[in-house]
Image (spheres, rainbow, N blue to C red):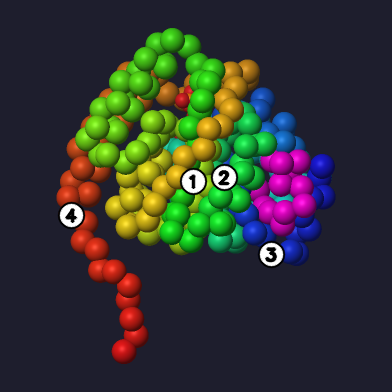
Amino acid sequence: MPNSASADQTPEVSVVLPVYNEEGAIADLVAEIATAFQGTPHEIVVVDDGSTDQTRSILQGLKSTYPQLRPFTHAQNAGQSRAIRSGVEKAAAPIIVTLDGDGQNPPHDAPKLVERLKLAPDLGMVQGRRAKRQDNASKRWASRLANGVRKRLLNDGSDDSGCGLKAIRRDVFLNLPYFDHMHRYMAALVVREGLLVAFEDVDHRHRTTGTSKYTNLGRLFAALSDLVGVMWLRSRRRQHGQVHEL
Ligand SMILES: Nc1nc2c(ncn2[C@@H]2O[C@H](COP(=O)(O)OP(=O)(O)OP(=O)(O)O)[C@@H](O)[C@H]2O)c(=O)[nH]1
Ligand SMILES: [Mg+2]
């Protein structure tokens, strides 16, 4: 479904994909996103984070088929959170959808997150929750441990902070503090801004191409060490209520 949005229409939704060496997944994923948002003016902002495979040339080739595709590239690898942020900075729509670039988050779930966000002005973000996770046992175990500790300490209501599929208001995202791996703490950071976060069950698929970019231990270590930083950020929050012009 290539022409689901014309390039000169202002998009309502910007789908932001961080990708690093995902040459086997990217073409099908772009096609699935275009189908999922057919009928909604949208753009697909892909941030290639210094890939060393064919990801970049495949993206260049896809531009003629998908006018709504806007690929960007980092000069050097800077991580998933930085790539998401670069994509949101470039995005033109007020609503952002993020999802993993390896195809593990089926795009057909994304429009329902967007609809929920649109209907509730007090919601800053709608986060996906992988109801039936398609990962191996060691990864599910490591994730359960990290999610349990984080939820208890941050009380952010999230059972699955690592789910890549989220819909968030662009202005809210750009107010969040940036640090490497902050994408795992989005719910707590949005709540810190005084906004609500809702959760929706979404599908999840096995990775069928490419390789994992994280090890279980590396992911767990990063998540737990950043937890201390996020607890500090939370403790330094002060709310001002509404700002009135005098
Ligand atoms: N931009 C960017 N994206 C990254 C980087 N590392 C991972 N990603 C992307 O972040 C997403 C999640 O990474 P994955 O390796 O799939 O992590 P995972 O889903 O926990 O692991 P698998 O189940 O093995 O796929 C994918 O779209 C990756 O391409 C990075 O350094 N930069
Ligand atoms: Mg993955």
Marks 4 and 1 in Cβ contact (< 8 Å): no
Marks 4 and 2 in Cβ contact (< 8 Å): no
**C-alpha span from label 3 to label 1:** 22 Å
At numbered mark 2, what does the secondary structure look like: helix, strand or loop?
helix
Looking at the rendered structure, which numbered label has been put on residue 113? 2
Earlier along the polypeptide chain: callout 2 or callout 1? 2
At numbered mark 1, what does the secondary structure look like: helix, strand or loop?
strand
Give the quadrant of the C terminus.
bottom left
Circle 4: is it few (<14), some (14-19), or many (20+) Cα within 10 Å? few
**C-alpha span from label 4 to label 1:** 24 Å
Residue 140 higher or lower than 180, as above or below:
above
- What span is colored magenta in the figure? 33-47
At numbered mark 3, what does the secondary structure look like: helix, strand or loop?
loop
Looking at the rendered structure, which numbered label has been put on residue 236? 4
Say if residue 18 shows up in the picture.
no
Residue 212, given in percent of the width and then of the height, sits at 50, 21
